[in-house]
Image (spheres, rainbow, N blue to C red):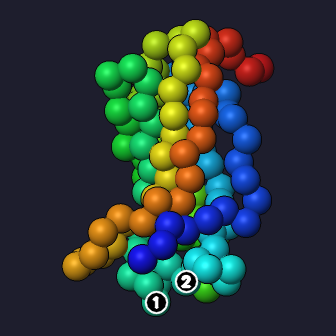
Amino acid sequence: MANLTLVTPIPPQVICKGEVFAVSMHVHDDGSNFHWTTAGFTPKGYITVGTVKLEGTGAVVNAGGGTATVSWTAAQTLTVDANAWGTIVLYADPTSGSENRHIATIFARITAESIP
């Protein structure tokens, strides 16, 4: 199985320490919408900053349309160092019997600034 792709690439992200963070994605499999339900996968993601790895919560927005989100809580983002760089990895997690399918790896900057 080949990797999945984003219809629109996601640029590097800024994560505000201690705030909710989410990524929305439109995923393709070989040029067509990735059908989350038919394929038997769940959207997943993790943020890694140094030795800290935060597992996100995925949700399918439109199964046949290939859209999904992955989010992290304010309590989770509070645990990473500010003024640091990290990565966000998005992938499709099988409900059974196969390997994860990589979607994208995105650079992220962690900041302690709060957005009013």
Relative image position of residue 16 (x, y in whole percent): 62, 23
**Residue situated in front as seen by the camera: 107 or 67:** 107
Relative image position of residue 20 (x, y in whole percent): 57, 35
When the figure is inspected, residue 23 is found, relative to residue 97, above or below; the finding is: above
**Which residue is under mark 1?**
38
Quadrant in the picture for residue 1: bottom left
Question: Which amino acid does the dot numbered 1 rest on?
Answer: Thr
Label 1 environment density (alpha carbons within 10 Å; few <14, some 14–19, many ≥20): few
Question: Which amino acid does the dot numbered 2 rest on?
Answer: His
Quadrant in the picture for residue 32: bottom right
Relative image position of residue 92 (x, y in whole percent): 44, 65
Whether residue 70 is visible = no
Whether residue 69 is visible = yes
Kindly identify the residue that appears in the image at 62 percent across and 23 percent down. Answer: 109
Kindly identify the residue that appears in the image at 35 percent across and 65 percent down. Answer: 100
**Which residue is under mark 2?**
35
Instruction: Provide the secondary structure element on which disc 1 rests.
Output: helix
Placement of the C terminus among the 4 image quadrants:
top right
Kindly identify the residue that appears in the image at 35 percent across and 33 percent down. Answer: 53
**Residue situated in front as seen by the camera: 53 or 58:** 53
Instruction: State how many labels appear.
Output: 2
When the figure is inspected, residue 98 is found, relative to residue 8, above or below; the finding is: below
When the figure is inspected, residue 35 is found, relative to residue 7, above or below; the finding is: below
Quick one: which residue is furthest to the left in this view? 97
Kindly identify the residue that appears in the image at 54 percent across and 14 percent down. Answer: 84
115 sits left or right of 85 in the view = right
Q: Are marks 2 and 1 in contact (CB under 8 Å)?
A: yes
Quick one: which residue is furthest to the bottom in this view? 38
Relative image position of residue 42 (x, y in whole percent): 42, 69
Instruction: Provide the secondary structure element on which disc 2 rests.
Output: loop
92 sits left or right of 69 in the view = left
Label 2 environment density (alpha carbons within 10 Å; few <14, some 14–19, many ≥20): some
